[in-house]
Image: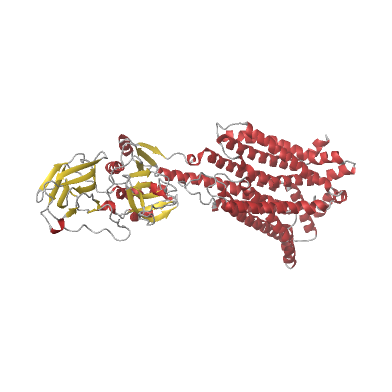
């Protein structure tokens, strides 16, 4: 019966402690349940547990403070030893047990309310039992501190100081030093952590909680150190200013500021990490996809994909051909070729938000000769009479061979006899749709006056030796072929000059070139693996952190430029077509008829993997639990603070302090506490997110992955800091409003309080 009366008398403090325990246990259990199902790291809940070390003592101390008279009366009646400890800790332990059970229920069933098939496993219950047991020990220890207060102080109702003497001189400073050292260790580990390490240390994972507690301690310490300055500043000003400054730096205000700042920092860190992981996954998915719709063409080559898009979409509004070659892990072996003429129309808006858009670079990447498909059924060759620079006549045994990629993607050779002064013609097979000329050779030294396939003049673009230096399209444009016959050296193959021009590309990752000199010390021009499998000389024009289709490591160039003189498509090159989301159905049907299965972008969560996706969901739960704990910290002792506000307002009214001075005092107090909370939460949140969170391995790592970058979300950081400051301001103003709105006579109110 006595216990029920005690519970009824202290229902407010009991409810706050129960709710605080329930919120802590529920957050831990829900997060661990999600992590356990998908293979995440349970250590992600460590910041919430560290935060609980601040929130729970605040609630316990407020409950014990409310029971101060009850415990003093029990001591007067002779209670001591075990009975006194049981009386002091019993109510707090009961609140912890009830809160633990309620938190276990909410944390276990909560995920199933959001996800239909969420598991209800034993791991969550095990964590619930462990956390509840720890809370019971913690609250029991904090409650016992109440009985260490000298009985005479309790009977005289002197200001509450549960830690006095040796305990007050050692425990509080030791705890502050421990938190400070832990924060420094966390920062050191975060700054020296390996960015590619798949796992972060336990202390680093708990780092946001450690820095949050340290930030709260620093904010509280700043208020205490500002007490002398507040006294000096208020001495020469109005009564309201003096009262406001004294209230702001009073010992009673620091626990609230400390708890709210710590909760805000943990919430910012957890929610920023989760949102950054989601943004990383969304950007990675977009880059890997390339466009809203994608159709792989497993049976087609790169040129086939280019011609298909030109046939289905002649205006270039909906489709863009692409080819991706991955012959190895190096950046120069991961090459994506896009039909950049259509980039802005098809993929520009889809990729610009990822930071890897190519819009400003399109003109530079297309500044090189593009592929020129030819069509015809006959090859015509005219060899001139003997010339001074052509040497002796080729003679009747000399032949000229033309290599070209036919309609089926195979390299085919057409051969003609080189008869001086005659025009020779031979049928050509497999060049009715589009073929690409890739080589020209002769068995003897021949001066060619004419070489034509169908209506296309094959001498117009010029021919060069494959060993000749490649020209750089970013410097001087290629010159026109010299007038006069083309002299074919005996036994040497020439290639079209268009294919020898360095292709402009943009790179991502560690782009390294091979040594081209005979001694290995002369680095040749940059090269990548071309569409036909041969090395293709390139000219990097820009560098990005990530690129479409190759993501974090690779090279991107223009597909028509890359197809120039390419000897077909190797099996390592995948041809595909990218399409807009609003592509007409008849155009998509044409892609399907060509063998392409049109697929939209997969869910972005797939880019994270099950473990990292589970960690992102768990971090949201941690952030939500931190917000709830911060709100409960404001409720702890709210009734006592409102009562104190009534008494102080009554005393001020009794001595004649006008209402405007009382309002000024409330405003000054709210501004000081709100500004302190805002600055501490913003700075600590920025430091925690920018240094610690980035080092905890939130996303998959690798050379070909999108760099994670910074997890800082300015809008979220500002919202959390302003929200924390606003809560403190509202708390102060509500207390002032309740105290100022009391209509009873000041003398009667003070007399009633003294009698109580």
The type of colouring in the image is secondary structure
Nearest the eye: 527 or 375: 527
Question: Which residue is outermost to the front?
Answer: 519
Q: Position of residue 37 (x, y in %)?
A: 57, 34
Q: Is residue 396 left or right of residue 283?
A: left
How many numbered callouts? 0
User: Which quadrant holds residue 662?
Assistant: bottom right
Percent position of residue 97, x then y: 73, 36
Classify residue 649 by image quadrant. Answer: bottom right
Is residue 607 rendered to the left or right of residue 317? right
Of the 4 image quadrants, the one containing the N terminus is: top right
- In this rendered view, identify the residue nearer to me: 81 or 246: 81
- Please state which of residues 401 and 395 is positioned toward the viewer in this rendering: 395
Q: Residue 720 in the image: state x and y as whole percent.
A: 60, 51
Q: Nearer the viewer, residue 566 or 711?
A: 566
Rendered position, 485 above or below 333 = below
Q: Position of residue 427 (x, y in %)?
A: 15, 41
* Residue 385 to residue 433: above or below: below
**Is residue 632 positioned above or below 390 on the image?**
above
């Amino acid at each position: 019966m006595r216990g029920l009366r005690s519970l009824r008398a202290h229902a407010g403090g009991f409810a706050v402690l129960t709710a605080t325990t329930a919120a802590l246990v529920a957050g831990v259990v829900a997060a661990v349940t999600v992590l356990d199902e998908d293979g995440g790291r349970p250590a992600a809940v460590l910041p919430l547990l560290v935060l609980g070390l601040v929130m729970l003592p605040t609630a316990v101390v407020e409950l014990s403070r409310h029971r101060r008279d009850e415990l003093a009366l029990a001591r007067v009646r002779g209670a001591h030893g075990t009975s006194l400890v049981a009386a002091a800790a019993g109510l707090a332990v009961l609140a912890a047990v009830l809160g633990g059970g309620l938190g276990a229920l909410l944390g276990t069933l909560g995920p199933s309310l959001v996800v239909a098939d969420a598991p209800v496993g034993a791991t969550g219950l095990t964590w619930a039992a462990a956390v509840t047991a720890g809370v019971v020990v913690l609250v029991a220890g904090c409650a016992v501190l109440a009985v260490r207060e000298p009985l005479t102080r309790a009977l005289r109702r002197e200001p509450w100081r549960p830690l006095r003497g040796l305990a007050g001189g050692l425990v509080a400073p030791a705890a502050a030093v421990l938190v400070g050292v832990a924060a420094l260790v966390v920062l050191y580990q975060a700054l020296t952590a390996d960015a590619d390490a798949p796992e972060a240390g336990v202390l680093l994972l708990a780092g946001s909680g450690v820095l949050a507690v340290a930030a709260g301690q620093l904010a509280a310490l700043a208020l205490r150190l500002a007490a002398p300055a507040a006294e000096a500043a208020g001495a020469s000003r109005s009564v309201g200013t003096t009262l406001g400054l004294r209230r702001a730096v009073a010992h009673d205000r620091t626990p609230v500021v400390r708890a709210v700042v710590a909760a805000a920092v943990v919430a910012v860190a957890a929610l920023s990490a989760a949102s950054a992981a989601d943004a990383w996954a969304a950007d990675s998915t977009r880059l890997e996809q390339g466009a809203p719709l994608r159709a792989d063409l497993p049976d087609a080559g790169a040129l086939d994909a280019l011609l298909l898009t030109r046939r289905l979409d002649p205006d270039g509004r909906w489709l863009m051909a692409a080819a991706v070659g991955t012959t190895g892990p190096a950046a120069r072996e991961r090459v994506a070729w896009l039909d950049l003429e259509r980039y802005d129309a098809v993929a520009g808006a889809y990729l610009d938000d990822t930071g890897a858009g190519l819009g400003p670079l399109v003109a530079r990447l297309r500044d090189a000769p593009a592929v020129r498909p030819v069509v015809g059924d006959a090859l015509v060759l005219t060899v001139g009479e003997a010339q001074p620079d052509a040497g002796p006549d080729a003679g009747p045994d000399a032949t000229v061979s033309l290599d070209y990629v036919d309609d089926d993607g195979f390299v085919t050779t057409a051969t003609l006899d080189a008869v001086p002064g005659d025009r020779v013609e031979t049928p050509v097979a497999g060049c009715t749709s589009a073929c690409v000329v890739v080589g020209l050779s002769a068995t003897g030294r021949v001066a060619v006056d004419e070489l034509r396939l169908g209506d296309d003049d094959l001498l117009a673009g010029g021919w060069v030796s494959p060993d000749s230096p490649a020209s750089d399209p970013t410097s001087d444009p290629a010159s026109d072929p010299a007038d006069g016959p083309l002299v074919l050296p005996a036994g040497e193959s020439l290639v079209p000059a268009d294919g020898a021009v360095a292709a402009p590309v943009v790179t991502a990752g560690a782009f390294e070139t091979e040594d081209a000199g005979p001694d290995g010390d002369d680095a040749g021009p940059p090269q990548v693996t071309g569409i036909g499998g041969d090395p293709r000389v390139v000219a990097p024009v820009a560098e990005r952190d990530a690129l479409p289709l190759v993501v974090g490591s690779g090279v991107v160039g223009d597909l028509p430029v890359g197809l120039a003189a390419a000897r077909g498509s190797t099996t390592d090159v995948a041809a595909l077509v990218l399409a807009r989301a609003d592509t007409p159905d008849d155009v998509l049907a044409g892609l399907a008829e060509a063998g392409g299965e049109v697929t939209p972008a997969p869910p972005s969560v797939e880019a994270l993997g099950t473990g990292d996706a589970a960690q992102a969901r768990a971090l949201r739960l941690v952030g939500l639990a931190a917000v709830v704990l911060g709100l409960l910290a404001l409720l702890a002792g709210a009734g006592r603070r409102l009562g104190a506000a009534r008494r102080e307002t009554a005393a001020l009214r009794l001595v004649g302090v006008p209402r405007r001075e009382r309002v000024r005092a409330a405003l000054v107090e709210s501004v000081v506490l709100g500004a302190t909370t805002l600055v501490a939460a913003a700075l600590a949140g920025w430091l925690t997110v920018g240094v610690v969170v980035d080092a905890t391995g939130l996303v998959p790592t690798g050379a070909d992955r999108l760099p994670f970058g910074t997890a800082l979300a300015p809008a979220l950081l500002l919202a959390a800091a302003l929200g924390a400051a606003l809560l403190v301001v509202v708390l102060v103003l509500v207390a002032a409003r309740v105290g100022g709105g009391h209509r009873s006579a000041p003398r009667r109110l003070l007399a009633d309080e003294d009698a109580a």
